[in-house]
Image (cartoon, grey):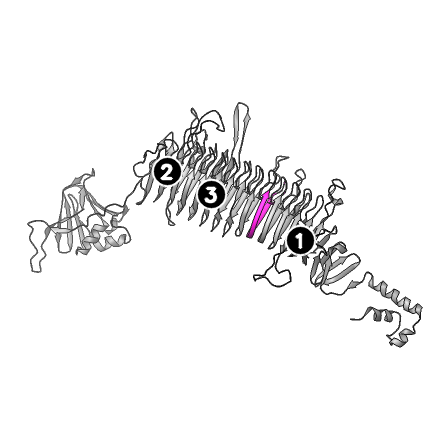
Amino acid sequence: MISYRKLAMRVLGHSPVSAARTARRSTAKRAAALALTAALVVGMTLPAFAQDWYIEDGDISISAGETGNKVTQGSTTKENDTDTVIKSKDSSTASSNTVTIHADEGKTVNVTLDNVTINVDEGYKYGYEPNAYKTAVSVTGSGNTNIELNGNNTLTSGYGHAGLEHNKTDDSGTLTIQDEKNDDGSAKGSASDTTGSLTATGGYHSAGIGGSDEHDGQVTITGGEITATGGNGAAGIGGGAGDKYAAVGGDGDVTISGGTITATGGSLGAGIGGGAYGNGTVTVTDGDITAKATGNYGAGIGGGFGAIPKDTLIGGNGTVTISGGTITEASGGYMAAGIGSGYQGLGTVTIEGDAVIKNAQGGEAGAGIGSGTYGDSEIIIRGDAVIENAESSANGAGIGSGQGDLYPDGDGMVIDLTVGNVTIEGNAKIENAKSGSGGSGIGGGVIGIGNVIIRGNAQIGNATGGEEGAGIGGGALGTGDVTIEGNVTIENAQGGAGAAGIGGGAETQPDTEDTRNKVSIKSTEAGSPNITAKGGGVLNGGGVLDENAPLPGAAAIGSGSVADGATEVKSNITVEGKVTIDATSGGNVAIGDSTNGETQFSGLQVGTTIARRNAKGDDVSQPGDVVREPEKPAQPTVTPTEGAEAPSNGSVEVERPVTVEGLYVTNVLGKQITHTCTQNGTTLTIRANGIVASAHLTLGMVRTLKAQGVKTLVFTTLLSRSTTVSVDALLAAEPDAPDEMAVVWTHTGPRAALTIGGADHSDLLK
């Protein structure tokens, strides 16, 4: 590398000379050389090599170069900086200088923050104009920016700006916050690994990390220890506050695949997701996350405050997908969900993989997981996901929808129901889902319908409805449509006072075909359900429709109760296959409704056990509730009739009377009639004195006859020719059928028919 001194000499037209000749140089020429050297150094673009940049030395601007970053600080610009590290000389003292990062389309900027402390919060010094205030670190451009964290970094921005700001536009790139290396630059993977951290605080209407005032925000976090606090109206991580009239800003697009995250939203904003009037789209694949909405109307994880200024919902929606990691806590604000939507928004939540939700806490009138007040929900919980606790403080479902609306209109009341659509499947496990009051454990919030599907190998520990809310199904004033199938275990579905354990909430009326509670329980190839359900007890006043009217206790499975004089909504309940149900009523009916009483079931499979008790503990079981293993039919034996001659030792077969145990013959009225059986060698003949007669056997009997050497069966009746059937052909028609399957051979005058298990096999007859 040529020195500045040699460069100056060449510019002046001199070659380097010896020390002796330099000593004789005139003072004027020496001064000229020094002046030129100084002029070249000032503002010079320095060659590329690693360099630390100290924030105390001035604002720093970074953009993508050809092979590295272009970094400018003050009058110094460095091209192709391959390892841009920004530091504080004294991290205990905040600098008021800023960092601006810009990546053009197709380019990537990599920057390391190493124990940097920046605070540019000036209160309201310049009034309420965000452009007058500064941003600690701002990321812009259509390209991508990766920020590596070393040590402890703190960023605090001014009014209208995010602590670490990245406004999402139609053509913006991505911001990724990472902790890929140790503080000394070494690879991670040992016990001595270090963790970089970032604490980011947004100004008024701005996220801790993400969008500024009236802007959307985008953030990806792959590692590090992150603490982010949003300003009033903004998310902790995600969107700034939007403008509900212009319908701009507020949305938050956040992806987290690692790290330990603590995010706190300002009033109207989510902990992670949307700001006020913004939607939240959040994807979590790993990490440990705590997200809280400290004010009203924002979700813990999901949507911010939704408003309807011109008949169209602006913001509030929460689309959350969690496929891994641990949500240590997600707490929504008043009228918002813990995980899902904010006030009035749609909560679309998928929890799958090996995700663990330790505590999802909805604010008053919001669901633990699902939607906020006046919002519907679409929820899928599957894979090996575990929900340890999902709870609404009041009026929302533990898992499902938030509170609906009830308001007077003329002479009556308008009931505007929310809908909680919940599917729990795979090996998912719900340990506790609970509503404080009014809502269901799983399904609808107060004034909410619960449409719930539980299938596969899903396990439900406790699903507890609040007062007037079902354990699983509808909230107060809401019906339940519940399907349970497969190897499902429900340890305790407990209805709140006046509500069903599984089915409808209390005070659901009037009864129509469209408002029936529907419960379907059945076994599948995956297995059979095992369910314990308890109806809520008596409510002595304090109901939603009439606070002075008491409500009776409710069914364990079926309908909630209504006040005296009202018409209770009926229940359509079906049970199929093999099931195990323990149902304890809070009133008189265990499974059903007060109008139709106990629902009876028939045709259930062997092994079914349904236990029913009323509130007094009395057994109210119904016929068909217990299906035991049937006694095995006596094996048919063919024995010679007493006094019959034994076959001769010669070659001529002798027909002899025999008795076939279990075989009988009926006439046209289904009454048994006299018949005889004879055997001649390998042929067994059945004779009956009737024009219309049916011989009744089972496949087990036929198999036994074959084992005893019988190869052909013959049936002879009056006015009919004898018909025959091969034993081998008969058994081959239904080779896998059970022994108890019926074989019916019928003669009707000259016509003959043969059925096996009800299926026609007359073609076997000869």
Residue nearer the viewer, 312 or 265: 265
Q: Nearer the viewer, mark 3 or mark 1?
A: 1
Q: Position of residue 163 (x, y in %)?
A: 68, 48
Kindly identify which residue carries mark 1.
153
Chain-order first, disc 2 or disc 1 = 1
Check residue 169 for magenta coloring: no
Displayed quadrant of residue 315: top right
Contact (Cβ within 8 Å) of mark 2 with mark 1: no
Question: Callout 1, which amino acid?
Answer: Asn
The residue stretch that appears in magenta: 271-294
Question: Callout 2, which amino acid?
Answer: Ala
Check residue 283 for magenta coloring: yes
How packed mark 2 is, by other alpha carbons closer than 10 Å (few <14, some 14-19, many 20 or more), is many
Q: Element at badge 1?
A: strand
Q: CA distance from mark 2 to mark 1?
A: 58 Å
Q: CA distance from mark 2 to mark 3?
A: 20 Å
How packed mark 3 is, by other alpha carbons closer than 10 Å (few <14, some 14-19, many 20 or more), is many
Q: Residue at x 57, y 41 (%)?
A: 332
Q: What number is the disc on residue 432?
A: 3
Displayed quadrant of residue 550: top left
Q: Nearer the viewer, mark 2 or mark 1?
A: 1
Residue nearer the viewer, 402 or 89: 89
Chain-order first, disc 2 or disc 3 = 3
Q: Position of residue 468 (x, y in %)?
A: 46, 32
Kindly identify which residue carries mark 2.
583
Residue 629 visible in this rendered orientation of the protein: yes
In the figure, is residue 61 to the left or right of 250?
Answer: right
Contact (Cβ within 8 Å) of mark 2 with mark 3: no
Q: Residue at x 62, y 63 (%)?
A: 186
